[in-house]
């Protein structure tokens, strides 16, 4: 499945992950444990402002089936069932969140060497259908996505994208918001291990003539520590320090500053994830 052009959601994902992933703005603590039967339990506590929330998630894998169940402190139960190869080269994902029965969703992904297709149907009284497709190769791919609302009989969303991927670089362009926005991004890896990289992203919304330009980078200080930073044209500066305190367990310290209003209190975040 990895030899094809990838899913449409993968277009631009490398740049997005570098610019947003792990930039926490609250306090988060999670602990994972694994049983002999293959069940992985993860307990998470989050403190944001004056509010504290938590959840417990159980992940179980049996042959080609993956079951994920999450309980949170707001009495919600989220369940996801993933089955590989019911039909060859497919992945089927069914999810629902209780007590919101209208949150049910069924998704089928089909993988081919030169094309990937995804169909997702919302299991509600007024279901919507999400269709996406990509064609190409692991080096070059183009794709499109559309959402069809059955209640109105109209397409409420359509997006198109193109990406070029090389061993040390990746460039993407996405036209979205029904043609009202465009986003271009470029990632360049600075070493063969891909632990250091530079990234740039520019987006424009045509209806408001608003432009946003963001540059960032990832630098591996050593085998256990890495530093990330990003800055946009609105003066928002974000920094992130990650350290592997023990194997597979990460400590993340993040902060965001407004360089155009240094009198404002910067945001700080802390996350500790302990894994077996």
Image (cartoon, rainbow, N blue to C red):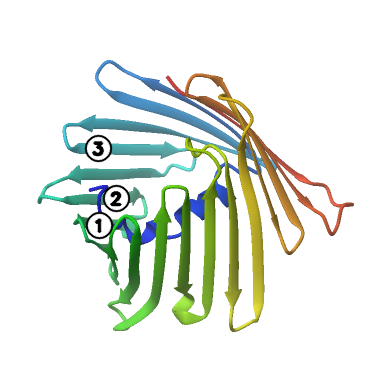
Q: Are marks 3 and 1 in contact (CB under 8 Å)?
A: no
For image coordinates 55% across by 27% down, the residue present is 250
> Neighbour class for label 3 at 10 Å: few (<14), some, many (≥20)?
some
- Residue at the left extreme of this rendering: 87
- Residue at the right extreme of this rendering: 263
For label 2, the SS is: strand
For image coordinates 31% across by 43% down, the residue present is 79
Please tell me which residue lies in front, 250 or 3. Answer: 3
Q: Is residue 133 shown above or below 89?
A: below
For label 1, the SS is: strand
> Neighbour class for label 2 at 10 Å: few (<14), some, many (≥20)?
some
Q: Are marks 1 and 2 in contact (CB under 8 Å)?
A: yes
Mark 2 highlights which residue?
Answer: 95
Please tell me which residue lies in front, 242 or 202. Answer: 202
Residue 12 image point, x, y percent: 46, 59
For image coordinates 28% across by 64% down, the residue present is 136
Residue 123 visible in the shown view: no
Residue 264 image point, x, y percent: 85, 52
Residue 66: which disc?
Answer: 3
């Amino acid at each position: 499945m990895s030899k094809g052009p990838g899913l449409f959601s993968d277009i631009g994902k490398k740049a997005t992950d570098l610019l947003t992933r792990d930039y926490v703005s609250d306090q988060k603590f999670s602990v994972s444990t694994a049983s002999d039967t293959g069940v992985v339990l993860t307990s998470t506590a989050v403190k944001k402002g004056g509010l504290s929330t938590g959840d417990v998630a159980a992940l179980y894998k049996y042959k080609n089936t993956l079951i994920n169940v999450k309980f949170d402190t707001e009495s919600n139960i989220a369940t996801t069932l993933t089955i590989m190869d019911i039909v060859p080269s497919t992945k089927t994902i069914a999810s629902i969140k209780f007590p919101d029965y209208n949150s049910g969703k069924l998704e089928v992904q089909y993988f081919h060497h030169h094309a990937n297709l995804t169909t997702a149907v919302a299991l509600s009284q007024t279901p919507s259908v999400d269709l996406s497709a990509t064609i190409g190769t692991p080096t070059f791919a183009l794709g499109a996505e559309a959402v069809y609302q059955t209640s109105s009989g109209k397409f409420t969303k359509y997006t198109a994208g193109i990406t070029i991927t090389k061993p040390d670089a990746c460039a993407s362009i996405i036209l979205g918001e029904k043609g009202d926005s465009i986003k271009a991004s470029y990632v360049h890896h600075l070493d063969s291990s891909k632990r250091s990289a530079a990234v740039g992203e520019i987006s424009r919304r045509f209806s408001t003539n608003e432009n946003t330009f963001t540059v960032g980078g990832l630098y591996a200080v050593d085998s256990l520590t890495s530093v990330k930073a990003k800055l946009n044209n609105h003066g928002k500066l974000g920094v992130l320090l990650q350290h592997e305190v023990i194997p597979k367990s990460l400590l993340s310290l993040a902060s965001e500053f407004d360089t155009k209003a240094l009198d404002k209190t910067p945001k700080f975040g802390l996350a500790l994830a302990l894994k077996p």
